[in-house]
Image (cartoon, rainbow, N blue to C red):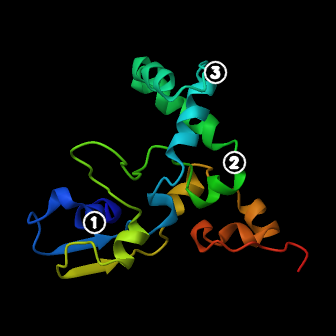
């Protein structure tokens, strides 16, 4: 919802399409809304599906032959390998990332970089959240409350770059 709208405000391809925007229930700067390691995740996904090649072209060709339903079913297995990301990315693998090549790059840099450098469409926006935001992740079992209670550092956003001392 809101993150998708925000991405349009960050994309050069959407210039002139919007004169106002409402970002409800999230935006592109949310840690769950951006894939910062797409290559690594693609290789993990391919490996989980049976392709062990380290050649990016081979991996791409392989993934393009996999039925969409198998990609989605395998997403959970790939995400479950990295416990901290399960909580902080809400179990999502297929989310926007920077497109480094091509004529029609929708996202040319990270949302943080685009915002920091002022490379976004400057239109009036309204932002909002709802009561009990994120409870769907709890219902789906993506977030383990006991794990979060025993290690509150899991709730610190990854993009802050903070190295936490768990002994404190």
Residue 97 x %, y %: 41, 51
Residue plotted at (25% across, 80% down): 126
Residue 160 x %, y %: 60, 74
C-alpha span from label 3 to label 2: 19 Å
Name the quarter where the N terminus is drawn: bottom left
- Disc 3: CA contacts within 10 A as few (<14), some (14-19) or many (>=20): some
Answer with left or right where residue 46 lies relative to residue 17. right
Front residue of this view, candidates 146 and 41: 41
User: As drawn, which residue projects farthest toward the right?
Assistant: 167
C-alpha span from label 1 to label 3: 35 Å
- Disc 1: CA contacts within 10 A as few (<14), some (14-19) or many (>=20): many
Circle 1/circle 2 CB separation < 8 Å: no
Residue 82 bears which disc, if any? 2
Answer with left or right where residue 59 lies relative to residue 152. left
Determine whether 111 is above or below 48 in the image: below
Determine whether 152 is above or below 50 in the image: below
C-alpha span from label 1 to label 2: 29 Å
Q: Which of pointers 3 and 2 indicates the residue nearer the eye?
A: 3
Determine whether 120 is above or below 69 in the image: below
Residue 29 x %, y %: 43, 69
Residue plotted at (27% across, 42% down): 102
Q: Which of pointers 1 and 2 indicates the residue nearer the eye?
A: 1
Residue 21 x %, y %: 19, 73
Determine whether 21 is above or below 32 in the image: below
Residue plotted at (27% across, 72% down): 119
Residue ID for mark 1: 10
- Earlier along the polypeptide chain: callout 1 or callout 3? 1
Answer with left or right where residue 151 lies relative to residue 141. right
Dot 1 lies on which element?
A: helix
Residue plotted at (53% across, 35% down): 42
Residue 52 bears which disc, if any? 3
Front residue of this view, candidates 21 and 38: 38
């Amino acid at each position: 919802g809101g993150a998708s709208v925000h991405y349009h405000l960050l994309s050069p391809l959407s210039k002139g399409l919007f004169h106002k925007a409402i970002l409800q229930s999230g935006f592109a700067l949310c840690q769950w809304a951006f894939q910062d390691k797409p290559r690594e995740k693609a290789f993990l996904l391919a490996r989980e599906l049976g392709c062990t090649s380290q050649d990016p072209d081979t991996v791409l060709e392989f993934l393009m032959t996999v039925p969409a339903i198998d990609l989605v079913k395998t997403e959970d297995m790939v995400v479950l390998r990295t416990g901290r990301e399960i909580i902080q990315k809400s179990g999502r693998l297929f989310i926007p990332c920077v497109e480094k090549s091509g004529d029609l790059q929708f996202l040319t840099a990270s949302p943080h970089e685009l915002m920091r450098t002022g490379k976004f469409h400057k239109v009036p926006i309204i932002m909002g959240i709802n009561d009990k935001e994120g409870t769907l992740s709890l219902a789906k079992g993506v977030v383990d409350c006991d794990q979060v209670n025993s290690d509150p550092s899991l709730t610190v956003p990854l993009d802050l770059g903070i190295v936490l001392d768990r002994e404190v």
